[in-house]
Image: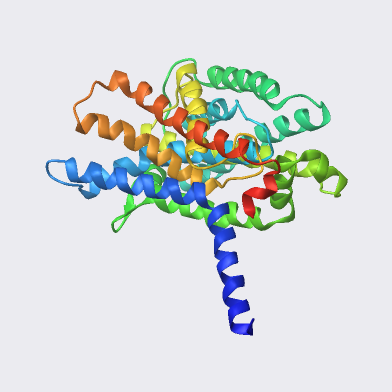
Amino acid sequence: MSEVAVNARRSSEGWSIWFTAQRGLLISVAIFATMFAFYGWKLEYGLSASMVNTAANKGALLALVAMAQTIPVLTGGLDLSVGMVFVFTNCLAATVVNGDPLRTTLGVALVLLTGIICGTVNGLVIVYGRLQPIIVTLATGAIYFGLGLALRPQPGGSVNPGFADLMTGSFSVVPSSVLLLLIMVFCVWIPYRRSILGRAAYAIGSSEHAAYMSGVPIKRAKILAYVLSGFFAAIAGLLLTALTYSGAAKTAIGADYTLNSIAAVVIGGTSLFGGTGSAIGSIFGAFIMRTVGDLLIVFDINPVLQPLFVGIVLLFAVSLGSLRLLRIKNKLDLYR
């Protein structure tokens, strides 16, 4: 076989491996593009800049919480506290992100630090307490909600208008929330994905025992996963405050975003068994879920039925992922 033929074959195999690894992401991108294009086509007056900005803001909120959920899921865990961290940081932001620019900046830093501390607590208890992530995050989520309720017994508060406009406005025709997601992807997710601890998270999710035997830094990788989860949830809390100009400690909000984040993760191609997936796919999974609600409005379907349609989409996505895993004996086969 000639050298040219060998190189062509290797290139073909490389593309095949890449496509297999990114299949979930590519499918979620295609579904979202189709659904959003259909949504724009069904609108009587088409998509305006303000409508695109509104849709982007709604999708970005869930996308950030879904990114927070994705990283623990990659390690084979599940963070049931992301919604409550989201609510807690929203209440905190409505209290401290106001006043002059310096005070606003310090308030933003405090909110982000709070999210990181919440995630660190989760990670430390899970790793050194050797407890199940579901149990730990369910308990800590109740604590974080209680702290939010202590800050805001009643909905209220305020936020710096300039900060709110920066977070929810648009630059030319590009919504600020989309730029925020891009910053999170390129400045946080991609460096993390390519780091030693990022690769370790995938290894842990594929087989924690094999990762341990290979010398993977399991403890540090797990703790960092939950730290980043808290960080992304805090970013989402800041965005919610910028959108609503207030904070509200409501159990329904936390529970809704927690469950929807899990759905977005699955729809985005991340396996709940761990070891495979991407935060980018979760972003598109979140936008798919938000577009489902928009389509229901366009088709004049009772919004009460939205959970039914979301449940059907989620069940379909989970079923596909489960069938795929049942066909293989080793998760490494996902990349062959």
Residue 24 screen position, x and y as percent: 50, 46
Coordinates of residue 322 in the picture (x, y in percent): 57, 33
Q: Which residue sits at x=43%, y=34%?
A: 241
Q: Nearer the viewer, residue 121 or 306?
A: 306
In the image: residue 94, left or right of residue 291:
right
Relative vertical location of residue 140 with respect to residue 218 in this rendering, above or below: above
The quadrant the C terminus occupies is bottom right
Q: Nearer the viewer, residue 302 or 59?
A: 302
Q: Is residue 121 above or below residue 250?
A: below
State the residue at coordinates (42%, 45%): 163
* Left or right: 73 in relation to 39: right
* Residue 289 can be seen in this image: yes
Write the residue at 19% across / 27% down.
Answer: 300
Q: Quadrant of the N terminus?
A: bottom right
State whether residue 152 is above or below residue 245: above
The answer to which quarter of the image holds residue 159 is top left
Looking at the image, the residue that sits furthest to the top is 153
